[in-house]
Image (tube, rainbow, N blue to C red):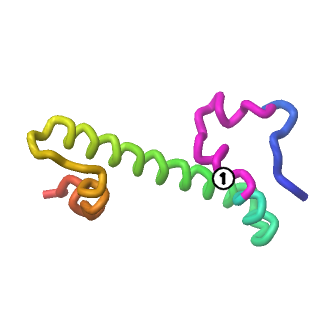
Amino acid sequence: MRIGSPPCVGVHGPKRIELPRLRESLDELNELALEEEPSYLDFIAYIVEQEVIAREQTQRQKGLRQLVSRSCVPWTASTVASIPRSAARPSST
């Protein structure tokens, strides 16, 4: 059985509840569900986890862009892309 939008959600459901990662990867998620046959709870947990990861990544990128835009150093996109993820995270000390 292929997973799709139930009639009550409609085509714009993921957009209305702001799940851009879900919209981008619906076909991939359908194939994953068909192959692995997870429980509904596991499938929803996976979708939410992927959305959270994508949002955290977006926030890190926005933070770096803001940092670079405030900087006096002439940064380039390739310079920013070469910064390791661990350097972008604030230390927990």
Element under disc 1: loop
Q: Nearer the viewer, residue 37 or 72?
A: 72
- Residue under the image location 28 percent in, 42 percent down: 65
| Tally of numbered discs | 1
Instruction: Quadrant for residue 88, please give it.
Output: bottom left
Where 13 sits versus 88, above or below? above
User: In the rendered structure, which segment of residues is drawn in magenta?
Assistant: 10-27
Image quadrant containing the N terminus: bottom right
Q: Quadrant of residue 80?
A: bottom left
Image-based side of 2 in relation to 44, left or right = right
Left or right of residue 7: residue 42 = left
Q: Position of residue 48 (x, y in %)?
A: 58, 50
Q: Which residue is mark 1?
A: 25
Residue nearer the viewer, 73 or 25: 73
Task: Examine the image and state in which quarter residue 27 appears.
Answer: bottom right
Residue drawn 72% across and 32% down? 13
